[in-house]
Amino acid sequence: MAVYLDPPLWPAHGTHFSHLVSDTSLEELHAFAAAAGIPERAFDGDHYDVAEARYGALVAAGAVPVEARILVRKLIGSGLRIPARRRSASLKLPLLTRWNEVLPGHDALFLDLLDRWGEEHRRYHGRTHLLAVLEALDLLTEPAAPPRTVLLAAWFHDAVYRGIAGQDEEESARLAEDLLPKTGLPGADVDEVARLVRMTADHRPEPGDDDGALLSDADLSVLGGDPASYARYVAAVRQDFAHIGDEDFAAGRAAVVRNLLELDPLFHTSRARELWLAAAHWNLRGELA
């Protein structure tokens, strides 16, 4: 049982804010906040927003200071975290925080990618999916951080999205090959990012491709959600293909589901199998039925 506090990195109202969370219960969090004099209006569903002026006092009162990514992991592990889909549609601030952990100082590229992921025609393949993949990578690699090339591949893997399987991944990989060298990223790393992006076309990393396994598993983690989450995923995918008639979509989607069920393995890391495999098979078979 503990209350955690990340650094004051979030700009707003002329200052910067931290997040205060509990790894156990909202009751514990509310009690700590009340004792520290934090007003109820600072509560935002699963955390309190606290100004940087309070940071030192909160640590002195017993809040455990941690990096932002560790705080997110603690919140996810507690089961208290509100899913990204229920947050602001823009998701600019949480994504900016994550971008600055992997490629700081390249705001123009961040904004380009953010715009791409926020295109109007996207429903499932939007910013919520991007954030979910990044969070899944955290879960798969904790307590370590995911490799930078894997994180960058996550940022680029659906950067181009027109709903054309294979072509989207190829164009996204080419986009990475075009834009990443301008950041000074070593050529070998650029090549690796592009390779990983292309791998997401079929989610079949070669044996021994640990980084490919990580990205593939994170990208497919949505399959292992609870029934309500899975139903929302399927509905969002249907909206992505709203231009296709019901009969044609049903036939195409059934083929996709059968292909996923035939993947052996569906998840390549032991951690992903532990987290999502049983639920994924249940969800996929239920959808096909």
Image (spheres, rainbow, N blue to C red):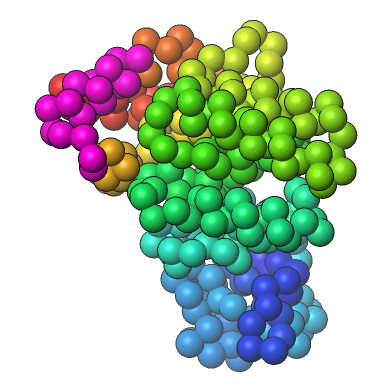
The one nearer the camera, 94 or 270, is: 94
Magenta residues span: 242-259
Residue at 75% from the left image edge and 87% from the top image edge: 53
- Asked which quadrant contains residue 110, the reply is bottom right
* Residue 57: % across, % down: 76, 84
The answer to whether any part of residue 188 appears in the image is yes
* Residue 77: % across, % down: 54, 49
The answer to whether any part of residue 77 appears in the image is no
The one nearer the camera, 92 or 143, is: 92
- Using the image, determine if residue 83 lies above or below residue 130: below
Q: Is residue 114 magenta?
A: no
The one nearer the camera, 102 or 25, is: 102
State left or right for residue 231 relative to residue 111. Answer: left
Q: How many marks?
A: 0
State left or right for residue 103 relative to residue 71. Answer: right
- The quarter of the picture where the N terminus appears is bottom right
- Dominant secondary structure of the magenta stretch? helix
Residue at 56% from the left image edge and 31% from the top image edge: 171
- Asked which quadrant contains residue 244, the reply is top left
